[in-house]
Structure formats: C-alpha cells, structure tokens
Amino acid sequence: MSSITSQTINVSRLGRGILGIAALVAAALAGVCIGETPIPVTIVLQTLANKIFGSAYQLDPIDMGIIWNYRLPRTIVAACCGSGLAISGMVLQSLLRNALADPYLLGISAGASTGAVAVTVAGLGGGAISMSLGAFGGAVAAFAMVAMLARAAGGGVTLRGTGQIVLAGIAGSQLFNALTSLIITKSANAEQARGIMFWLLGNLSGARWPDVWLGLPVALVGLAACIWYARALDAFAFGAESASSLGVPVRTVQVVLIGFTAMVTAVMVSIVGSIGFVGLVIPHAARFLVGVRHGRLGPLTALIGAAFLIAADVLSRTIIPGQVLPIGVITALVGAPAFALILIRGRRAR
C-alpha cells in the first residue's frame, strides 16, 4: 500500500514538473512570437533550426533578425531575471522565516540600483568598475546596513524572521532610493535622467545576447545553490537555533546564501532595472502548489518566476498599442492583488 502511495506521489511530482516546463516553453514561444509584428510559431521554429542546427529553411531575413537578435535574447533574459528574483525571494523568506522578505523589500534591489547608477552616471571607479560589479557592491552594502540596523534594533546576532529586519529593510530601501535620485539629479542630464528612470522601473528593451551570457549562468548558479542547500533551508523552517541543533552550520549557510542572493539580484538589476513583487509573490504561489520542501520548491519557483516575467514582458509590449510599458508596472499591477489574496488566505488559514 505504501509502495503504491509513493509511486502515486512520484507520478504527481513528475506531472507537475512536466506541466511547469511546458508552461515555460509556451511562455517563451509567446514571448518570441508576440509583438508589434506578430510572427507565426513555424517561422520561429524554422529560424531556431537554421541558427542552431544549420538547417536551410528559406525565410525572410527581417523576420530572422527580429527573432534571433531581438525577441529571443529578450525572452531568455526575462526568464533568467524572473527565475533569479523568485529564487532570491524564496531563500530570504526561508532564512528569515518572514513571508514579507524579498530582495526589493529588504533593500537589496534598491542598493543594487544605487551601485549601478553610481557607476554609469556618476562615473564611480573611473571606468574600471563594471555596471554589474557596481550593482553587486551596492546590493551587499544595502543588506549589510539593513542587517546591522536590525541587529541594533534587537534582531540578535543571527538573522531572524522578526519584524525588525523588515522595518530595517524598508528604511534601507528608502535611503538607497533617495541616494539613487540624488545621483541622477546631480550627475545626469535630462536625456540620461529619462532613460535611467525608465530603466529603474524595469526595461527589457535593450536585452541582447551579451546579457544572456551574463544572466543565464548567474540564474543557474543561484538555483544550484538553492538545491544544494535545500535540506539546510528545510531546517531553517524551525528557526536558526533548531537548525543549529540539527547540525546545520547556521552562520556559514546564511553568509553563502545571502551572498548568492545579493549576487543574483545585483546582476539582474544591472540588466533590467529594479523589478518588484517577483521575489515576493512567486515563492508563495509555488508553496501553494508543492508545499515547503525546498528540494521541489526551488525548481518550481524558478519555473514559475521565469514564465511569469516572460508573460509580464509580453503584456508590457502589447497592452498599449505602439507603446512599451516598464515591466515593473506590469509586475506590480499583477503582484499587488496576488499578494493581497495570499495575505487574506493566510489569515483565514490561521
């Protein structure tokens, strides 16, 4: 009887995994096909066959250029950013035992934005520092400040899922957002300021293949770290002290995973700007589907995050004809009501 039950559970997990992958593939095809110039799926598949496998389909060079040089890298970058931000939110929520934790709320995203703007607009580093490195430095500095402020407010030596760190994160976000605005006001001209403000709300218009080679490895490394530390993250569900009693090296796990979270967030912010609600809402949706065990929660969170941001990008291009909205506007319009439903559902469950 137990063997049959186990086989049923495994089949159910396999079915969910296949469904998740199918949803991601469908979203990716939609991201490549849908735009100001709709392109049929057959043309997309033939273009991929020509470029990847050396096939010889006779296609319009303009359509091939749109697919290969513009829409495909944009879709892949959207998937990487959605996956990376969702995984980062899941890790922070687990480590801190706080449903409100995510890179945006805890100041990591705001710090990354400040670092990126300081490098590109204010010229920090004199050209020796890349935008991604500046964003990473800003992300680490922001979270370090938030952690120290939470500790000074009574959060203790280790990171805990208390209200102090969320409040400290809100303060840190406001501070670094103010620093970003100050840098833009002081150092950018009108055209730069307009472009940066649009970028800060999330913008995939400039995503190209170099961004894919930067974002894809980082997203995969973040997911691999989450899977590697899945059992440790399961132990954190009972608190840092309980995880320590189970043999988890608490401080090491916290430093490594928060370091990965800062790195992933910084790289994604440097590519597409600051996008909210992905890291906050997607992990809750994944938990609703598969529970809290991180061995299966991590991959599903990555899949849903990737599909969600691709869909948001498609909406940002098509919801207003002839105009592209910042993708952060779409994620907020969808994410805010979704999170409200999660809060209401959680209250009823108690």
Image: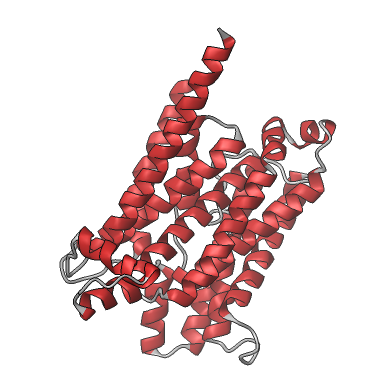
Residue 299: x %, y % from top left: 53, 44
Residue pictured at 56% horizontal, 36% vertical: 296
Position of 89 with respect to 281 (left or right) is right
Q: Dividing the image into 4 quarters, which one contains the N terminus? A: top right
> In the rendered view, would you say 254 is above or below 128?
above
Name the residue rendered at 41%, 30% in the picture: 344
Question: Which residue is nearer to you in this view: 106 or 278?
Answer: 278
- Comparing 176 with 273, the one in front is 273
Residue 34 visible somewhere in the drawing = no
The number of callouts visible is 0
Left or right, 306 with respect to 235, comes to left
> What coloring was used for the rendering?
secondary structure
Measured as percent of width and height from the top left, residue 310 is found at 35, 57
Q: In the rendering, at what x and y percent does residue 4 appear?
A: 52, 13
Instruction: In the displayed orientation, state which residue is furthest to the top.
Output: 1
The answer to whether residue 96 is above or below residue 110 is: above
Q: Position of residue 110 (x, y in %)?
A: 54, 65
Decide if residue 142 is in sight here.
yes
Quadrant position of residue 37:
bottom left
Quarter of the image where one finds residue 314: bottom left
Q: Is residue 115 left or right of residue 66?
A: right
Task: Name the residue rendered at 37%, 63% in the picture.
Answer: 75
Q: Within the image, what quadrant is residue 123 found in?
A: bottom right
Q: Residue at x 57, y 57 (%)?
A: 220
Vertical relation: 127 (above or below) 173: below
Above or below, 98 relative to 183? above
